[in-house]
């Protein structure tokens, strides 16, 4: 954690969008905003464990907003994170049928300009469900897809690292793995409906 | 799906490895074909889900490090209380202090006993169900087990939505029951746990009965159903071989009695 330089919003967004130094960007988000997000939960009927869970989800929703180009720095990262965190925590409170007067909670907090995250939340639900199907793929497939799409390694680098004889074999295996995953999605009615809704093809 | 634009072609497009002319042709075709657009969207969604999994493990790890670092930093920067230099206290002084502390603790405990409701007793005694290591290793193929290990409790119910209770094995019922408790839903937990109990009674088996006893007692406590909770707690305490034999102290049993009488 020890990096002392503080990145600007622009630097953080660039690192996430280009998948370059993504872990450092996430660390910057934690260093810069965890305190303020936690404070909101603690002041609104939550405890530290609630804060940890909510902030984790907030970070994932934020990363997805950037990833899908729904947030490109139109407002400050602080405002957006605060808005997502607040939205997730209020939903959580609602689910817990908290006796807290939510109207009071709404009026207590100043409104901030935040992109609409309802679609992102729907997508995140789909991703979470898809993760369980991903676990059903073989180890080699999981590793290959992770290295290519998350670590951004080239086919050649993956071939060398994972012991494939050439990059064409990696390419073919990757296609096979993707098809397997997509077949599983299409074979799971609940997930398929959820994905279609998230993509706007639902009823 | 138009043959020319098969999955390989579409994936190459998303990966940015098509020639410029091929890319332009596909983009023209996309304007006309909804099938191509839908297939591409599904692929894009799948790729994002793969990235999301990566984000999730990074965020998990970084949050863990961050909180750990914060705890360490707190203890490092905490302000030390001023030292009582040179002052030596007699043994009698320390005995008095210890006696006062003991008295305060006992008083506090008695007060707690009188006040502890089901929710507090639940919080005090709830332990998450841990899947045994040798069993966990075989769970990679079991979707519910895999989700449980990853703490994806909500998803466990989503993937099971289309199944009836009769279609689950005892172990799956236990996982769903404890997952419902993790999600603070004791009524839902009871549906699964009672099924284990009734199956065992009907078939004269003992599959996960100890676990079902314990988690049903927890669910009853959370719902304030003290009489039923008490029956199970007393059963656990009376059977020395019961896995949860020592999980409730006599004082907690007494506290449940008190709540039951109110």
Image (cartoon, coloured by chain):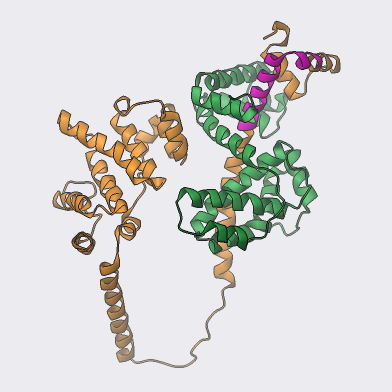
Span of residues in magenta? B28-49
**Image colour assigned to chain A:** green
**Image colour assigned to chain B:** orange
- Closer to us: B150 or A195: A195
Which quadrant: the N terminus of chain A? Answer: bottom right
* Spot occupied by residue A121 in the image (x, y as percentages of width and height): 60, 39
**Quarter residue B158 falls in:** top left
> Where is B197 relative to A138, above or below?
below
* Spot occupied by residue A169 in the image (x, y as percentages of width and height): 66, 16
Q: In the visual, does A45 lie left or right of B109?
A: right
How many numbered discs?
A: 0
* Spot occupied by residue B136 in the image (x, y as percentages of width and height): 38, 35
- Closer to us: B108 or B135: B108
**Quarter residue B17 falls in:** top right
Q: Is residue A143 inside the magenta stretch?
A: no
**Residue farthest to the right?**
B21
- Closer to us: B251 or A31: B251
């Amino acid at each position: 954690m020890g990096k002392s330089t503080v990145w600007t919003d622009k630097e953080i967004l660039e690192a996430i969008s280009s998948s370059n130094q993504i872990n450092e960007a996430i660390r910057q988000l934690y260093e810069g905003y965890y305190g303020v997000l936690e404070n909101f939960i603690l002041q609104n009927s939550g405890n530290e464990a609630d804060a940890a869970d909510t902030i984790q989800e907030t970070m994932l929703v934020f990363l997805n907003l950037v990833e899908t180009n729904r947030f490109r720095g139109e407002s400050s990262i602080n405002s957006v994170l605060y808005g997502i965190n607040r939205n997730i925590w209020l939903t959580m409170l609602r689910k817990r049928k908290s006796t807290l007067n939510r109207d009071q909670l709404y009026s207590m907090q100043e409104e901030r300009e935040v992109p609409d995250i309802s679609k992102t939340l729907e997508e995140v639900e789909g991703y979470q469900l898809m993760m369980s199907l991903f676990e059903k793929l073989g180890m080699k497939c999981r590793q290959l897809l992770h290295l290519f799409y998350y670590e951004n390694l080239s086919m050649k680098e993956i071939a060398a690292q994972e012991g494939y004889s050439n990059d064409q074999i990696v390419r073919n295996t990757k296609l096979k793995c993707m098809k397997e995953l997509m077949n599983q999605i299409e074979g799971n009615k609940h997930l398929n409906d959820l994905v279609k809704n998230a993509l706007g093809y639902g009823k | 799906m138009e043959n020319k634009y098969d999955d390989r072609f579409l994936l190459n497009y998303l990966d940015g490895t098509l020639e410029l002319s091929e890319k332009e042709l596909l983009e023209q075709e996309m304007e006309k074909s909804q099938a191509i657009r839908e297939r591409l969207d599904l692929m894009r969604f799948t790729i994002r889900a793969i990235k999301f999994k990566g984000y999730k493990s990074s965020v998990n790890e970084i949050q863990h490090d961050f909180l750990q670092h914060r705890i360490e930093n707190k203890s490092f920067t905490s302000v030390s209380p001023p030292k009582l230099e040179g002052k030596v206290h007699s043994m009698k002084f320390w005995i008095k202090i210890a006696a006062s502390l003991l008295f305060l603790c006992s008083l506090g405990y008695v007060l707690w006993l009188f006040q502890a409701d089901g929710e507090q007793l639940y919080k005090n005694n709830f332990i998450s169900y841990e899947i045994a290591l040798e069993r966990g290793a075989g769970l990679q193929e079991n979707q519910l087990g895999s989700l449980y290990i990853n703490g994806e409790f909500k998803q466990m119910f989503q993937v099971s939505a289309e199944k009836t209770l009769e279609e689950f094995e005892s172990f799956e019922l236990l996982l769903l029951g404890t997952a419902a408790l993790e999600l603070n839903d004791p009524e839902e937990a009871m549906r699964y746990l009672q099924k284990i109990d009734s199956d065992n009674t009907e078939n004269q088996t003992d599959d996960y009965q100890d676990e079902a006893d314990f988690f049903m007692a927890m669910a009853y406590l959370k719902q304030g159903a003290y009489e039923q909770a008490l029956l199970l707690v007393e059963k656990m305490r009376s059977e020395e071989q019961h896995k949860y034999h020592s999980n409730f102290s006599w004082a907690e049993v007494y506290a449940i009695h008190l709540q039951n009488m109110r």
